[in-house]
Image (cartoon, coloured by chain):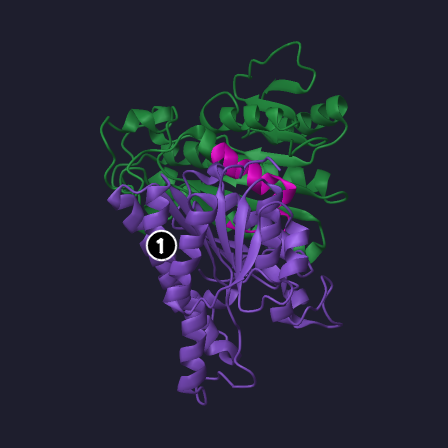
Chain colours: A green, B purple
Amino acid sequence: MRLTGKTAIITGAASGIGAATAALFRREGARVVATDIRGVPGDAADDGWLGLAHDVRAEDQWQSVFDQAIRHFGRVDILVNSAGINGASAGTGRQDPEHLALDDWRAIQAVNVEGTMLGCQAAIAHMKAGGGAIVNVASYAGTVGSPTAVAYGATKAALVQYTRSVTLHCGRAGYAIRCNVVNPGPIRTPLYVPLTGSGTPTHIPMQRIGEPQEVAAAILFLASDAASYVNGTALPVDGGLSTT
Amino acid sequence: MTGPFTGKVAIVTGAASGIGRATALLLAQAGARVIGGDLDTKAANEWHATLGGEGLLRRLDVTDKDQWTDAVAQAQSRFGGLHILIHCAGAVRLSKHPQEPDVVSEIVWRHMHAVNLDSLMMGVRAVIPAMREAGGGAIVAVSSLAGLRGRAGSSAYASAKAAVLQYVKTVAKHAGEQGWPIRCNAVVPGPINTPMMGSPGLAGAPNDPWVGEVPLRRYGSPEEVAAAIAFLASDEASYITGVGLPVDGGVSAAVVT
């Protein structure tokens, strides 16, 4: 087990990539603080699991999540910022640059970018003395133009840039904190599947969409000591889509 | 030994030292049967004792296509197939030949590309049929931070390592489009404490310009690069192909990629 003795906070843990990551981390021996906006059900008998209702947009709630993590488990070693929304999941209007509503732009920015920013700030405050690892979740959609998901794409591009800045800041400050980001391609999650039909995705070199467990495995690598010299990098998990 | 690579057969080039040696050892500890290739096989006995089990170190000049063919045939005849290629063999300089663009010679230019790049092309070409026969495979090449940014004193090396990244993408895309279950990725090491870098130790020399540039404030170890290579070669990276993964302590966070 690769995360024995570690405590991890994972946001967006009620579904998709966050849920797969939380389950995998628990199997690998981590104590898991699983958060989502409406809470995360877990096995009440599992004393290594703490599910919390957590709005990542609220700065004071981040303080509370870290406080509860430390009260239950004594420390926080890993933060995975996987809470995220897109226009479809948020029920917004059209997402092209011409018709995007300012309120929709702000709603998506607030969860994806501000939520991650607040999480990293809280994590740095807690980890700077003893070290730690942060993994953010961006998207292939942040690396190319996203004409029908312009707000989502912009937030995911921002996360890659933000991750690099966290890395350089922690380096200058001498904190033993690694910060990386994954760039998932099309993954079978509640965020992605409603946007697509069935059939073979021939535009992806591997000719299939990915599974949340496959992204979780990459997040596990980046969060674990196996990645002890991997820092500030954006790792595509996209079946080769970024080669095309 | 059993582990995530139990049942897998791997060829690891540059296996006598540095990143190649650390990777061969890690894969063997995780259950793989490893054929190590190197020009230098003087330490073969010691290498074999360290690896234990069924691993072997053989002479492999990665610029010689016949030796690639022979190594693949050896994997098949001795271990029943081939699933993994880790291509670590490479060279950063040719004796004292300068590589600055105004003085670089054809000799050093061609040598750098032969050792670092042509070798990958020949290796990939040699292993694809065996991996298809084995039902799938994973290739991991070793690029370099020098392949992401300019470096005058290593112009030929940097050019070849940049081409490694591009070639890996093409192989990944082609394999996918052909329906072959073969993934192809690269690691992009930054400053690593290896003989190729002069074995400076993790702390580096006093006032080492490299260390000041690394957010983690130290050199990496060959074992840390090996861990990233093993991840990319494993089934855990089942949806990762065509990627160049930096293993550089964070240097590339400040490099345009």
B240 up-or-down from B255: above or below:
above
Figure quadrant of the C terminus of chain B? bottom left
- Name the subunit of mark 1: B
**Residue A199 showing in the rendered view:** yes
The residue range painted magenta reads A215-233
Q: Which residue is drawn at 37% across and 65% down?
A: B66
- Answer with left or right where residue A180 lies relative to residue A85: right
Q: Where is residue A34 in the image (x, y as percent from the top left)?
A: 59, 23
Q: Residue at x 47, y 29 (%)?
A: A213
Q: What residue type is labelled 1?
A: Lys
Q: Residue at x 48, y 84 (%)?
A: B100
- Answer with left or right where residue B142 lies relative to residue A88: right
Q: How crowded is mark 1: few (under 14 residues within 10 Å), some or many (20 or more)?
A: many
B150 up-or-down from B182: above or below:
below
Mark 1: which secondary structure?
A: helix
Q: Position of residue A67 (x, y in %)?
A: 72, 27
Magenta: main secondary structure equals: helix
**Residue A231 showing in the rendered view:** no
Residue named by callout 1: B169
B64 up-or-down from B224: above or below:
below
Residue extending furthest toward the top: A44
- Answer with left or right where residue A229 lies relative to residue B230: right
Front residue of this view, candidates B207 and B14: B14
Front residue of this view, candidates B70 and B88: B70
Q: Residue at x 45, y 86 (%)?
A: B104
Q: Where is residue A153 in the image (x, y as percent from the top left)?
A: 37, 42
**Quarter holding residue A100:** top left
Front residue of this view, candidates B9 and B256: B9
The number of discs equals 1
Front residue of this view, candidates B244 and A154: B244
Q: Does the magenta stretch include residue A213?
A: no
